Amino acid sequence: MSAPDQAANFIPAGLASLGIEADEVELAVISGAHQVFWPGIQQLLALDTRDVEPERNPDLSKAP
């Protein structure tokens, strides 16, 4: 099963589990956003950070 088929099943089921009703237009917009953002999310999930040293005492108000 390809990713668009999975999204077509997952998105309506996920919304229904939250009690959200979406019409065809709303589902099309959500599906479009999924198609735009999912490839980048997959790349981030696949990123290997084992060799990255964690920053000690980070100051989140400043750039690293």
Image (cartoon, rainbow, N blue to C red):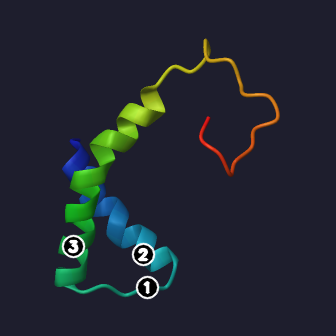
Quick one: 36 or 11, which is closer to the camera? Answer: 36
Sequence order check: which comes first, mark 3 or mark 2? Answer: 2
Mark 3 residue type: Val
User: Quadrant of the rendered structure where residue 56 is?
Assistant: top right
Identify the disc placed on residue 20: 1
**Tag 3: Cα neighbours inside 10 Å, few (<14), some, or many (≥20)?**
few
State the CA–CA distance, disc 3 to disc 1: 15 Å
**Tag 1: Cα neighbours inside 10 Å, few (<14), some, or many (≥20)?**
few
**Numbered disc 2: secondary structure:** helix
- When the figure is inspected, residue 17 is found, relative to residue 20, above or below; the finding is above
Percent coordinates x, y for residue 62 in the rendering: 65, 45
Q: For mark 3, what is the residue?
A: 29
Mark 2 residue type: Leu
3 or 1: mark nearer the eye: 3
Sequence order check: which comes first, mark 1 or mark 2? Answer: 2
State the CA–CA distance, disc 1 to disc 2: 5 Å
Q: For mark 2, what is the residue?
A: 15
Describe residue 27's horizontal placement relative to residue 59 as left or right.
left
